[in-house]
Amino acid sequence: MKTNAVVGTTSQIIWGTVMDLRSAGQAISRKRLMELSDMPYTKVDDHVSRWIEEGRMRRVVDGVYEVVDPMPEPRAVSVTDLPDGMTLVEIGDQELRLWPTEARALGQRMAGNAFQFTQLQTRDDVAALLVEATVRNRALADRVYDLEREQSRIKQHAFIWTPERIALLGTANDRDIAEQLGIDTREVERERGKRGIPRFPRPPKPSVAGSAQVSIQAEGAQVQ
């Protein structure tokens, strides 16, 4: 299936793809949205997550979603205690007069809805706190990363090549010397190259013939 070309904002393109998949009776998955809208994972996930928070979509399983049909606008609701002991319930243009026993029965029934509302509100509050904490943690992590980079930059710029440190150049590989001095390997490479000091030679790999000769000599020694 190929959706019709949609021209517009990123939100319009992704939402148009959602509606095309729904009209075709196909599963609305993150993978299909990425394929058909030609949008990256981050864009699709960001918009879908926002629509879930707004109640326009719901998550069926991880990576699969469905559109939530909008409910009609809520009507005005009012409850009035009348002088004769009855309770007047008004919903839009409809009225309902309840005797005390009926009002108590309705109240018991609606208590479950009130409890459910409280749970939903608590869940939303906790979710909002988690989102806020996540954003703060990311900001702190970015700040720590920036500070570490700045500290490393300052440390490298403040590093002084003393005669003792210069004498180490070329005596081992640059990485080992950098770890010993606590600086970046590129700083060691730069200083060694500036002073014309050759790179520490790598140990030669033993040749196959040499290994065979050593093995033959060892076997001869064992026979003697």
Image (cartoon, rainbow, N blue to C red):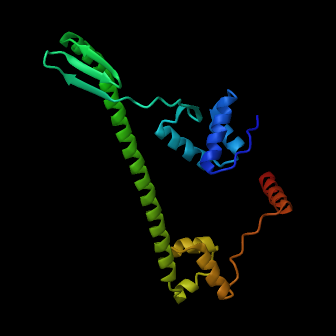
The image shows residue 61 at horizontal and vertical percentages of 56, 30
Residue shown at 31% from the left, 21% from the top: 112
Relative depth, front residue between 212 and 68: 68
Residue shown at 40% from the left, 55% from the top: 136
Position of 88 with respect to 37 (left or right) is left
Relative depth, front residue between 211 and 112: 112
**Quadrant that contains the N terminus:** top right
Can you tell which quarter of the image residue 80 is in? Answer: top left
Position of 26 with respect to 150 (left or right) is right
**In the image, residue 214 above or below residue 36:** below
Residue shown at 54% from the left, 71% from the top: 179
**In the image, residue 180 above or below residue 80:** below
The image shows residue 139 at horizontal and vertical percentages of 44, 59
The image shows residue 131 at horizontal and vertical percentages of 42, 47
**In the image, residue 12 above or below residue 59:** below
The image shows residue 31 at horizontal and vertical percentages of 66, 39
**Quadrant that contains the C terminus:** bottom right
**In the image, residue 94 above or below residue 176:** above
Residue 31 seen in the figure: no
Relative depth, front residue between 28 and 85: 85
| Total numbered labels placed on residues in the image | 0
| Furthest-right residue in this view | 209
Residue shown at 34% from the left, 26% from the top: 116
Position of 42 with respect to 78 (left or right) is right
Relative depth, front residue between 212 and 194: 194
Residue 130 seen in the figure: yes
Can you tell which quarter of the image residue 4 is in? Answer: top right
